[in-house]
Every structure is written in structure tokens, then in C-alpha cells.
């Protein structure tokens, strides 16, 4: 009888841990190093001083075959005319042949519906990407003229 009570208590504890508690643990997003020559945009600050702004892409692996892209800019870059530009990221998985394109905004507080990060189904393997600074619908000439960039990373 005592053995039956111990079994029932064990089953109840396992049930509570899996279905009521935290459930199955999910892997945390993993930052993936991106080796790149970033896209370069033209920016003018409030002092009317022109200069370059670099659109550096970051990537995080959320799950196998899924990558989150972003191109965060510094607050000083967001205070220039390039702060209203968008970054277009085109990718090609040379292992599987999967390809696509996403657009992100580098400045979080710019009034534009474009997200600051986008999840793409890149597949696992070696990914090649090109980056381009493009104007937004609100300011088509933001960050122009610009020079495109190129990069690569390995998606787990």
C-alpha cells in the first residue's frame, strides 16, 4: 500500500512539472557571428556635417532553420538624416538553396511600420547576405547615396 502511494505521488509530481509548471524548456536564442563588410550610408547631422553611417547586421538563431535579423544603429546615427532609412537584407543559403529578403529599420523610434527585427526561415548551413540602405516610404532619400555591403555566417 505504501508503495502505491509513492507511485501516485511521483506520477502527480511529474504531471504537475510538465503540464502545470514550466513545461518543456525552450533553447535560448543564440547570437550568431556575422562576418561582414557593412553597407555604408551618407548622413548629415544637425550641425550639417556629412559623414558615413555603417549598417551592421546582427543575426540570432531562434531555432534550427530560423534566424532573426536586425541592424541596430547607435543613437548618434539615429539623430542624423540616415536615421530615417531602412536596411534591406537579402540572403542565400548555399547549403540548401533557400533564399529571401527582409527589411528592418535600424532606429527604434522612427515612425515607420517596418519592424526593428525580422525572423526568416534561412535553413541550416552557410548563409551569404547582401545589405543595402534604402529610403523609407516617408523619406525616400534617407541615407542616400549608399554603398551596399556583403557578409556571411553559419546558421545552426
Image (cartoon, rainbow, N blue to C red):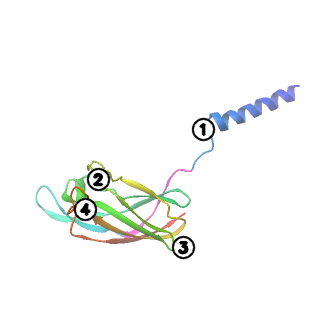
Q: Residues within 10 Å of mark 1 (few under 14, many from 20)?
A: few
Establish if 14 lies above or below 114.
Answer: above
| Residue 95: mark in rendering | 3
Are circles 4 and 2 on residues that touch, CB within 8 Å?
no
Stretch of the chain drawn in magenta: 27-36
Q: Residues within 10 Å of mark 3 (few under 14, many from 20)?
A: few
Q: Residue at the location (44% across, 66% down)?
A: 100
Where's residue 76, x and y in %?
Answer: 23, 54
Q: Earlier in the sequence, mark 4 or mark 2?
A: 2
Mark 4 sits on what residue? 135
**Tag nearer the camera, 3 or 1:** 3
Where is residue 88, by image quadrant?
A: bottom left
Mark 2 sits on what residue? 107
13 left or right, relative to 144: right
155 left or right, relative to 39: right
Q: Earlier in the sequence, mark 3 or mark 2?
A: 3
Q: Residue at the location (21% across, 69% down)?
A: 145
Assign a secondary structure to mark 1. Answer: loop
Mark 1 sits on what residue? 22
Amino acid at each position: 500500500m505504501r508503495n502505491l502511494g509513492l507511485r501516485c505521488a511521483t506520477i502527480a509530481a511529474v504531471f504537475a512539472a510538465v503540464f502545470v509548471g514550466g513545461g518543456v524548456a525552450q533553447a535560448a536564442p543564440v547570437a550568431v557571428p556575422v562576418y561582414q563588410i557593412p553597407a555604408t550610408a551618407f548622413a548629415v547631422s544637425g550641425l550639417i556635417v556629412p559623414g558615413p553611417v555603417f549598417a551592421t547586421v546582427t543575426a540570432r538563431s531562434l531555432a534550427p532553420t530560423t534566424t532573426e535579423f536586425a541592424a541596430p544603429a547607435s543613437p548618434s546615427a539615429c539623430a542624423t538624416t540616415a536615421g530615417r532609412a531602412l536596411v534591406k537584407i537579402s540572403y542565400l543559403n548555399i547549403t540548401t538553396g533557400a533564399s529571401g529578403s527582409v527589411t528592418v529599420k535600424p532606429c527604434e523610434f522612427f515612425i515607420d511600420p517596418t519592424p526593428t527585427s525580422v525572423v526568416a526561415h534561412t535553413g541550416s548551413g552557410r548563409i551569404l547576405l547582401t545589405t543595402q540602405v534604402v529610403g523609407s516610404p516617408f523619406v525616400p532619400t534617407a541615407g542616400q547615396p549608399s554603398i551596399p555591403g556583403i557578409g556571411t555566417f553559419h546558421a545552426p
